[in-house]
């Protein structure tokens, strides 16, 4: 264990805004050490049983090359894990022997990869959002028995970390906004349900010019149509 005077909450509370991904990763490094873990990762996870879908890593401190090997051996798409995380919002402690078939005399390829890199046990902490977003924070290391209180602390930290990461990326996107002022104005009014003709009247532009601005904005955010462009631009912080 690391500094027993700290816990996940106190470490995150020390991260003063505006948050950055670097500060969040540093905090996760310290949280992992306090709870006796070596590795951590932030994942998004599929909300449906789409074929081939699996956990996607957003950020981690995994050893070099491990992420590709994790994907190659099928661990990112390990069905029992994904089904368990999607079905139950509670934390999921695991150990390689019982969950991945880690018989040391004849381990599965996935279990062998985990054992070689010190992923012997850990915990997955799912975050089910009110929107379509689902993710989880995971910690792993050597055998480490966590108390129920420690697991609860880490689970609360998972929700906080995803919120902090969303704000960090929101601010970064806003600083690097690819939309022009007029494109943002048109999208904001479209978000309010205004037609191109109505937007033109409000902004003293022709309907054709408004359509050009909206088409350009749709291309810049890689959207399929105007409605999709409004949703993406708002989600990415481009309309703030």
Image (tube, rainbow, N blue to C red):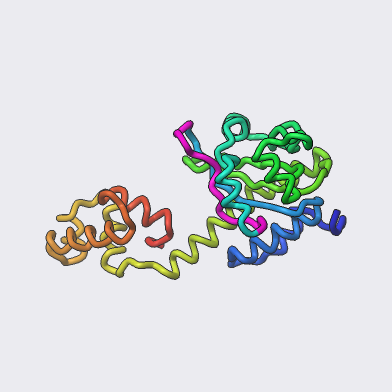
Viewport quadrant of the C terminus = bottom left
Residue that appears at 74% across and 36% down: 102
Residue 166 appears left or right of 152? left
Q: Which residues are magenta?
A: 49-63
Q: Front-most of 217 and 182?
A: 217
**x%, y% of residue 233?**
37, 57
In front of the other: 58 or 196? 58
Q: Residue 83 in the image: x percent, y percent? A: 58, 30
Q: Is residue 227 left or right of residue 42?
A: left
Q: Is residue 15 above or below residue 42?
A: below
Reply above or below: 229 against 206.
Answer: above
Residue 51 is a magenta residue: yes
Is 109 left, or right, of 192 in this rendering?
right
| Frontmost residue, 18 versus 98 | 98
Q: Is residue 102 magenta?
A: no
Reply above or below: 215 against 18: above
Q: Main secondary structure of the magenta part?
A: loop
Front position in the image: 221 or 238? 221
Residue at image point 39% right, 67% down = 177
């Amino acid at each position: 264990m690391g500094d027993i005077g700290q816990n996940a909450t106190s470490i995150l509370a020390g991260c003063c805004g505006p948050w950055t991904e670097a500060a969040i990763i540093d905090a996760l490094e310290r949280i992992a050490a306090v709870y006796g873990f070596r590795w951590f990762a932030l994942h998004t996870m599929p909300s449906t049983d789409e074929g081939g879908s699996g956990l996607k890593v957003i950020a981690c401190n995994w050893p070099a090359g491990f992420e590709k090997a994790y994907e190659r051996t099928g661990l990112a798409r390990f069905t029992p894990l994904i089904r368990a995380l999607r079905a139950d919002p509670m934390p999921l402690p695991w150990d390689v022997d019982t969950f991945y078939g880690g018989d040391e005399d004849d381990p599965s390829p996935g279990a062998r990869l985990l054992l070689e890199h010190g992923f012997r046990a850990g915990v997955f902490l799912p975050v089910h959002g009110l929107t379509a977003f689902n993710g989880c924070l995971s910690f792993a290391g050597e055998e480490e028995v966590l108390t129920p209180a420690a697991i609860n602390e880490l689970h609360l930290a998972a929700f906080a970390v995803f919120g902090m990461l969303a704000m960090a990326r929101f601010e970064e996107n806003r600083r690097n906004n690819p939309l022009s002022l007029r494109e943002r104005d048109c999208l904001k009014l479209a978000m309010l349900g205004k037609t191109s003709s109505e937007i033109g009247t409000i902004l003293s532009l022709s309907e054709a010019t408004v359509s050009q601005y909206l088409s350009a904005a749709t291309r810049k955010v890689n959207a399929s149509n105007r409605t999709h462009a409004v949703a993406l631009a708002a989600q990415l912080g481009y309309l703030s």
